[in-house]
Amino acid sequence: MRAETQNVVTEIEKSLELLAQRMDYETAPHRLEEFNARVEDPNLWDNPESAQKLMRERQLLVDAIEIYDSIKTDLNDNVELIELGELEEDEEVVTDAEEALTKLKAKAAKKELEALLDGEADGNDTFLEINSGAGGTESCDWASMLARMYVRWAEKKGYTVELQSETAGEEAGIKSAAYKISGHNAYGWLKSESGVHRLVRISPFDSAAKRHTSFSSVWVYPVVDDNIEIDVNPADIRIDTYRSSGAGGQHVNTTDSAVRITHIPTGIVVTSSEKSQHQNRDIAMKALKSRLYQQELDRRNAEINAAHEAKGDAGWGNQIRSYVLQPYQMVKDLRTNFETSDTKGVLDGDLDGFMAATLALNVAGKSRSEAQGD
């Protein structure tokens, strides 16, 4: 077997090892038997929410087993074909099997990445907030560029994007915007984006064409499932109504129906500016509960907590990623050192490489922590 082909086989085997580890392959058949026994319980649907959760968990396990077995079978079959082709000196058989292995490597890598999304809330929908930071008009324009980037990314994933609120900048762009992004693993993918994002470019607002540095912050937190109880004491919140200062149009209205809820003990502030005050209260309260739930996740999940603690103010020294458009083209994540010169692609929503690198880093850190704990 050629050295290049052996490297492909090794990469596939590494992906299989991770897939097996993430689902605990050795105990998977036994757990599936337990799921099947519970599914056959005639009283299962007495509690529809519990039943649906059970069915989802069972299906996830079934899918994980099938994916692992399928990749392993395809790997073994193609390795055998290569060995047979080399033995019979049939170059066509060898070439076809090598091409199949290359495609299998890409499939295995994709499934490996998806397997990293196994956190408590990774499968949930998510809220995403963007706030302009240091830099005035420049940072407001940068915030609007980030909003466009994440909307493009979500659309490529097939997710649903709902604009919850928006505050326009005084001259250009936006001061802030909040979105709800719905789809499988939306929070799991986006959670690594929380932090300060730094832009370096020639300013379109500077007649002297000087280079400017701008900052905007991104905050991501999961939409709380209906079956997760978050108690909010009415005495701990202040509800204000105000006139939305958004850009108007089909997404943002400008009536007095906008709602702001402040959670006094934590200082958390959430807003919504949809069409009715009743709807806005409901949306804002859900957002508040999600933020409080995120705090609980932070306490239980070291890597998410570290990311939020590192976020800091939207200014110099707190950034997680730099986007440099001049004097050269580069986007670099400062946590993983993952970088690309395709700045246009990134700003058009090609973010999976950055997210994957951070997910892998977090899992590696978690594994080391667990090993030390053992």
Image (cartoon, grey):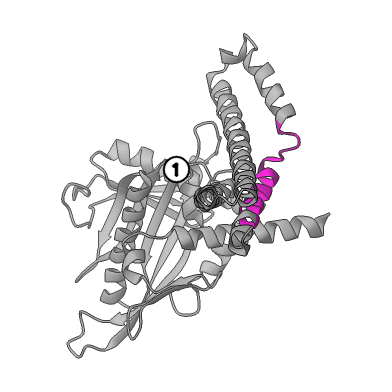
Q: Which residue is mark 1?
A: 125
Residue with the most extreme right position: 374
Estimate the x, y position of residue 170 in percent, counting from the top left.
Answer: 21, 69
Q: Amino acid at mark 1?
A: Asp
Residue at the spot 56% in from the left edge and 27% down from the top edge: 53
Q: Position of residue 189 (x, y in %)?
A: 48, 52
Which range is magenta? 10-28
Secondary structure of the residue carrying tag 1 is loop
Work out whether 333 lies above or below 9. Answer: below
| Relative depth, front residue between 18 and 234 | 18
Reply yes or no: does residue 24 show up in magenta: yes
Nearer to the camera, 65 or 69: 69
Q: Residue at x 39, y 74 (%)?
A: 341
Q: Quadrant of the N terminus?
A: bottom right
Q: Is residue 268 above or below residue 228?
A: below
Left or right relative to 318: residue 28 = right
Dot 1 crowding, Cα within 10 Å, few <14, some 14–19, many 20+: many
Q: Position of residue 89 (x, y in %)?
A: 59, 52
Give the camera-side residue of 267 and 81: 81
As drawn, the residue found furthest toward the front would be: 88
Image coordinates for residue 90, horizontal then vertical, percent: 55, 49
In the image, residue 57 lies in the stretch drawn in magenta: no
From the viewer's perspective, is 155 left or right of 311? left
